[in-house]
């Protein structure tokens, strides 16, 4: 009769939620951290939220801090991904470009807030590259009218709005 025992060192996953001000898909000096974003860790083999850490304790969703950082530690080795809860993303923000440039500074989420799947994390591995970038959306619009006096202003006393005008917006990169 022999007694065998196996040990492993827990693994770590995390990184940053950020406002991608210039919408280039990468964290840069002009970008800002996004605090208060709820991040849930998933077991990629089952597609369900990870519930138990390496010591048998519960795994709860993390909330990004004032630096946009979040961290899941004390995890058993495995394959994981994270999901950024869209309800906690500030109004007027949308996911930025995905996987642009290096894996340390890029945004790793799709349009639904799901990150890339982390390859198998072995005993003691750390992956601090699962970033989520969101860019501030803008709106354009107001009113169409005949500017009778050519002053660029809508004069309610002398000018009337024009209805049913198709407005086409063109994007030039």
Image (cartoon, grey):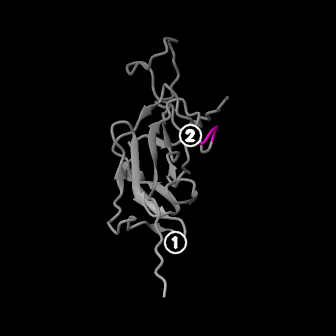
Q: In terms of depth relative to the viewer, which is nearer, 45 or 9?
A: 9
Q: Which mark is residue 46?
A: 1
User: Magenta region: which residues?
Assistant: 100-105
Q: Position of residue 136 (x, y in %)?
A: 47, 35
Earlier in the chain: of badge 2 and badge 1, it is 1
Q: Residue at x 65, y 32 (%)?
A: 170
Structural distance between the alpha carbons of marks 2 and 1: 26 Å
* Up/down of 53 relative to 104, above or below: below
Q: In terms of depth relative to the viewer, which is nearer, 82 or 155?
A: 82
Farthest bottom residue in view: 1
Q: Position of residue 164 (x, y in %)?
A: 54, 39
> Which quarter of the figure is the C terminus placed in?
top right
Q: Residue at x 50, y 34 (%)?
A: 20
Farthest right residue in view: 173
- Judged by its main secondary structure, the magenta piece is loop
Q: Residue at x 38, y 68 (%)?
A: 52
Q: Position of residue 131 (x, y in %)?
A: 50, 44
Q: In terms of depth relative to the viewer, which is nearer, 52 or 37?
A: 52
- Check disc 2 and report the residue beneath it: 104
Q: Position of residue 140 (x, y in %)?
A: 50, 31
């Amino acid at each position: 009769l022999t007694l065998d025992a196996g040990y492993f060192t827990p693994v770590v996953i995390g990184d940053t939620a950020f406002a991608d001000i210039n919408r280039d898909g990468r964290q840069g000096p002009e970008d800002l951290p996004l605090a208060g974003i709820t991040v849930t860790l998933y077991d990629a083999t089952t597609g369900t939220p990870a519930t138990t850490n390496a010591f048998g304790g519960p795994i709860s969703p993390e909330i990004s801090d004032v630096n946009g950082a979040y961290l899941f530690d004390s995890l058993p080795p495995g394959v994981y991904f994270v999901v950024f809860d869209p309800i906690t993303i500030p109004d007027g923000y949308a996911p930025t470009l995905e996987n642009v440039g290096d894996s340390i500074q890029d945004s790793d989420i799709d349009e639904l807030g799901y990150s890339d799947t982390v390859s198998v994390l072995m005993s003691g591995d750390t992956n601090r590259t699962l970033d989520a970038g969101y860019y501030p959306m803008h709106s354009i619009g107001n009113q169409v009218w005949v500017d009778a006096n050519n002053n660029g202003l809508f004069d309610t006393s002398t000018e009337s709005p024009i209805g049913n005008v198709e407005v086409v917006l063109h994007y030039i990169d």
